[in-house]
Amino acid sequence: MPYTALALQRPIRIEQLISVHYFEFGPDYVFAGESHNFWELAYVDKGEIVAVAGDTERPLRRGQMIFHAPGEFHSLRAAGQTSPNLVITAFCCEGPTMRFFEGRVLTAGEAERAALAVVVEQAAAAFSTPLDDPFSQHLERRPDAPFGAEQQIALALEGMLLGLIRQGLEDPASTAPGRPGPGSQLRTRDRAELFARTCSYLEANLHRQLTLAEICRDNLVGRSYLQKVFREKTGGGVMEYFGRMRIARARELIREGRHNFTEIAGLLGYTSIHYFSRHFKKATGMTPSEYAGSVKLLSRTGRGERERG
């Protein structure tokens, strides 16, 4: 009996990518707004914003995302004193399934955050277009892009969208074949709680020069287990993650503009401005002064003011 091929059902199919951005805005950032004929997703990675969709204002905090359907006017502004970080990606995806996202503000879980991290990481590797360029209207391919990077972007977005729809359609109390059993769920929850608790501890101690021994002691956890959890969650060790947190906070402080670089170095536990500057450039590719200049430029371009050469 001959085999019969089955054409797979693909209710979510992303064939065209318009843009991928990772923006670090100042606390006074305002985007006047636009509308276009493709989908756009905005995810708040840090801070808070106010997003406008049509005639409705939606406050969004860290971990939330909003979807703008084709043709919908949308704008945004920073909210409060915090300097928000946003992932914004635009793509073409047709079909009735996408109606699920019209007018929705959703909260990202671990799976969604991981998918967006893949999108940003692979976009930076696949395209030479800067992720923080607000005027880019097309993506330029890198000649040395990793094999399959563009497909990984599409798969990450499609998987995230499918997962969000399933969460909205399924009964959370129901059980389904293939779901992890209670023991596995408890272990996963324990690791997630340890990771969240340790991250809160690290954030509360950004002003200190922590050691791995101190972190383990204060959180009552063994060194090898904590390192294992962080590698699972972040792809690196605890101290590497702590270093990224300090640089992220330094970026916020620079964007807020209330402290000079020496004060920021002191607030984050650096022994000298020179050590802080070296660490900052190693992590970001820019000196603190260069980063501050790029933030000012982005704020002006957000208001439609281009630099004249």
Image: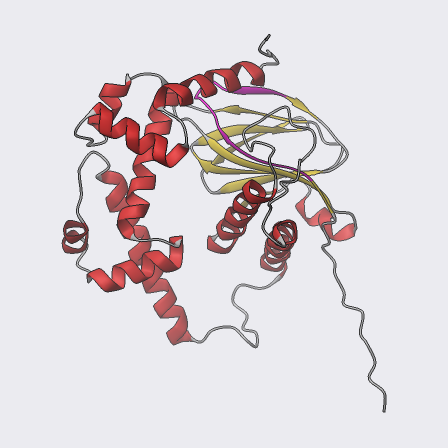
Image quarter of the N terminus: bottom right
Q: Report the residue that reaches farthest toward the bottom.
A: 1
Q: Nearer the viewer, residue 181 or 254?
A: 254
User: Residue 233: horizontal and vertical position, in percent?
Assistant: 39, 56
Taking 121 as reference, is 199 left or right? left
User: Residue 9: horizontal and vertical position, in percent?
Assistant: 76, 65
Taking 39 as reference, is 41 left or right? left
Taking 271 as reference, is 112 left or right? right
Q: Was residue 92 drawn as part of the magenta stretch in this picture?
A: no
User: Residue 98: horizontal and vertical position, in percent?
Assistant: 72, 49
Q: Quadrant of residue 174?
A: bottom right
Does 101 sit above or below residue 10?
Answer: above
- Total residue callouts: 0
Part of the protein shown in magenta: 18-32
Q: Quadrant of residue 81?
A: top left
Identify the residue at horizontal 26%, vertical 64% (top origin): 225
User: Residue 255: horizontal and vertical position, in percent?
Assistant: 39, 22
Does 290 sit above or below residue 91?
Answer: above
Identify the residue at horizontal 35%, vertical 58% (top origin): 231
Q: Quadrant of residue 230?
A: bottom left
Q: Nearer the viewer, residue 150 or 58?
A: 150
Identify the residue at horizontal 27%, vertical 40% (top origin): 203
Does 283 sit above or below residue 227?
Answer: above
Taking 241 as reference, is 124 left or right? right
Q: Main secondary structure of the magenta part?
A: strand
